[in-house]
Image (cartoon, rainbow, N blue to C red):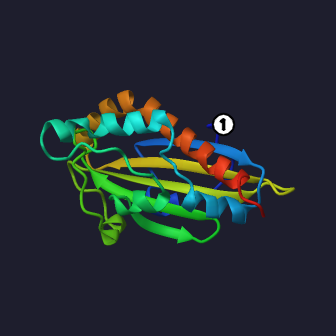
Amino acid sequence: MTRSRVAGDVNRLEDFAPNPDAAEFHRIEILASPDVVYRALWTANLGGSPIVKTLLALRSLPGIILGRAKRSEPPEVTLQSIVDSGFGLLAEDPGSEVVLGVSGRFWRPTGNLERFDLESFSRPVPAGMARAVWNFRVEPSGDRRTILSTETRVTCGDAASRVKFRLYWFVVRPFSGLIRIIMLKAVREAAHATKD
């Protein structure tokens, strides 16, 4: 698992966040064909780990305390449930890449997520807001091996939101990265359990 990016690698995130204020990249090699990995990406339980469940529960705690959310056991987390919960589908190249997006004031205790609007991602980020784009990319690596990567990019609308986001990101980034690494491993396990 590495955080380095392959030189010259271009993906669909460039369409939505070419100059991010923050970015994080992770990848993993999987001993399975790209088709198997892509299918596993959509069906794997990405939130089955006790660590991910705990971190997601902690993230929802302010909403519960403030009465904006109900306490419940986190359901199975799949890529589709992530899309259904507020991360909108920005783009999909079937078999190779999925790009999700969300806007909000992430630094606030409840996240203050905006309702997903695909058209808004073609305009500049409004002042006081931030926009996150998140992809999963599947690339062949020879001899029935596949590289599955994920990258998150965040762009802020103005200097004030940039300062707030960077303070938030300083605290959250290690946990965000850990969740993504665990998600990649969950897809690897699901792909390994599937026969070509």
| Foreground of the two, 105 or 78 | 78
Question: In terms of image quadrants, where is residue 143?
Answer: bottom right
* Residue 99 relative to residue 161: left or right: right
Q: Quadrant of residue 42?
A: bottom right
Name the outermost residue toward the right. Answer: 143
Instruction: Give the quadrant of residue 142.
Output: bottom right
- Kind of residue at badge 1: Thr
The correct choice, above or below, for 123 with respect to 47 in the image is below
Front-most of 190 and 23? 190
**Residue 97 coordinates in the image, percent (x, y):** 58, 63
Q: Is residue 31 left or right of residue 11?
A: right
Residue 94 image point, x, y percent: 60, 71
In the displayed orientation, state which residue is furthest to the left: 67
Q: Position of residue 150 (x, y in %)?
A: 56, 49
Q: Is residue 65 above or below residue 148?
A: above
Residue found 62% across the figure and 59% down from its top: 40
Question: Quick one: SS at disc 1?
Answer: loop
**Is residue 148 shown left or right of residue 33?**
left
Which corner quadrant holds the C terminus? Answer: bottom right
For label 1, count other residues whose C-alpha is less than 10 Å away and answer few (under 14), some (14-19) or many (20+): few
State the residue position of label 1.
Answer: 2
Query: In front: 117, or 84?
Result: 84
